[in-house]
Image: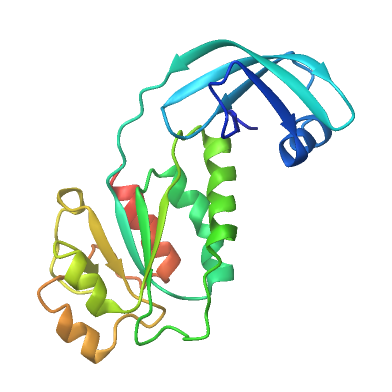
Amino acid sequence: MLQFLYHKDSGEKNIILDNQAFHHVFNVRRQKDSILILANMLDSKLYSYKILQVGKKQATLELIDSKSIKQNSPKTHIIQAIIDMNEFSKTLPYLNELFVEKITFFYSDFSQRNEKINIEKLHKILLNSSMQCGRLSIMKIEIMKNLNEVLNIYRDSIALDFNDNRINIKNHNSFIIGAEGGFSKNERELLKDRLFGIDNPLIMRAKTASIFVAANKI
């Protein structure tokens, strides 16, 4: 069930709801209530609109109230080696619900180079997730060429490995997660001072590891 509907003009006195938004509210959700809650994902507010008129393809809304919502600023940053994006995209709603601030994708030595990232598709997934879970922001998405670029920019990042170097995850914010198969010999050399392990005897898949890190930061 949607907590609110995203609309870029939320906050304006009057809004015309049309196209996909109209279809979603009146054809998919079959809105019965005369009040509709909107958000613009920019100002941490929810706006209550009264539905004044509904036509065949558009509806007229009038602002009647607004409410500021306080949500903690997300800090967790997942730096994920690129894997099968059709599969990993199913993980994005979980990361968004766990309040991950940003996900950075990079091509690792074990990434398939022909794997492409459709930013528009991922953004749509995250937008729908935020409307479902009530998050008044959207997880940021970033793409980098390789691990070297990641390490040059995110100097405080640490990398999940399955070794005996235990740390307190809550003391860190940026986490590098390898592709299926982990890190190559060359990458492990680059990461030798950043590798950490967890108290789990089992090997996790990349998407499981990202959820594990995000959940342990809550």
**Lateral position of residue 113 relative to residue 62, left or right:** left
Q: Which residue sits at x=35%, y=78%?
A: 145
User: Height in image: 104 above or below 170?
Assistant: below
Which residue sits at x=43%, y=51%?
95
Asked whether residue 210 is in view, the answer is yes
Q: Residue furthest left?
A: 193
43 vs 50, left or right, is left
Q: Quadrant of the N terminus?
A: top right
Q: Quadrant of residue 152?
A: bottom left
Quarter of the figure with the C terminus: top left
Return the x and y of residue 177 as percentages of the image width and height: 32, 69
In the image, farthest residue toward the top: 64
Q: Nearer the viewer, residue 61 or 185?
A: 61
Q: Is residue 196 visible?
A: no
Q: Report the residue at 59% width, 51% height from top.
A: 124
Picture coordinates of residue 125 (x, y %)?
58, 52
In this view, the residue in front, 76 or 105, is 105
**Residue 65, image x and y in percent?**
55, 10
Q: Choose between 28 and 216: the one closer to the eye.
A: 28
